[in-house]
Amino acid sequence: MLLTRLATRPRRMARMTYTTLHATPSAATYQHLRVASGLSPKSAEAAARGLPNTLFGVQLLHGDEVVGMGRVIGDGGTAFQVVDIAVLPAHQGRGLGKRIMQEIAAWLRDHVPASGYVSLLADVPADALYAQFGFVTTAPRTVGMAWKRPAA
């Protein structure tokens, strides 16, 4: 009977620790995190060209493994966009997206001029996360649009 009670006790999940790193991820890490977390893939060429233009990058590490990231891109004065918020599936549900956004929000408060415009494109239900940091929907006055490359 004692063994039965021990076996049916709820198991406590081991607490995982994460380290925050303010840095742009490598191209390989960026590509891996995007695909593994369900975002669209980016080519090595696109990553190599785009990542050096990051205004602010944040990574979350579990040990030596990068398990989450987020970036701010833009012109540094008038326009800023929050992009690439990604957390590996094995680490989702632990508040890491919120932690990434806390780091990004702090950077935005310190670096965006009063007249700067900060935007992001949110997938539902992630829009609820972004709303916690002051992001609001702009529709119907403005809507997000994406350029589609014409077929060759």
Image: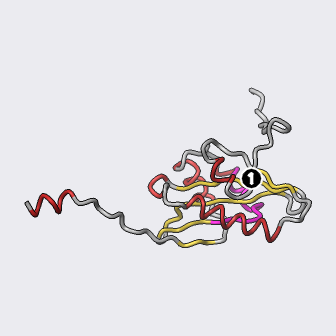
63 or 9: nearer the viewer: 9
**First to last magenta residue range:** 46-58
Left or right: residue 136 compared with residue 42: right
Q: Residue at x 89, y 62 (%)?
A: 77
Residue 53 among magenta residues: yes
Left or right: residue 65 compared with residue 149: left
Quadrant occupied by the N terminus: bottom left
Q: Residue at x 60, y 64 (%)?
A: 99
1 or 27: nearer the viewer: 1
Give the x, y percent position of residue 41: 61, 45
Give the x, y percent position of residue 21: 61, 72
Residue tagged by mark 1?
135
Mark 1 nearby-residue class (10 Å; few <14, some 14–19, many ≥20): some
What amino acid is found at the position of numbered circle 1 in the picture? Phe
Quadrant occupied by the C terminus: top right
Give the x, y percent position of residue 136: 75, 49
Q: Residue at x 80, y 71 (%)?
A: 110
Residue 13 among magenta residues: no
Query: Which of the 4 image quadrants contains residue 40?
Result: top right
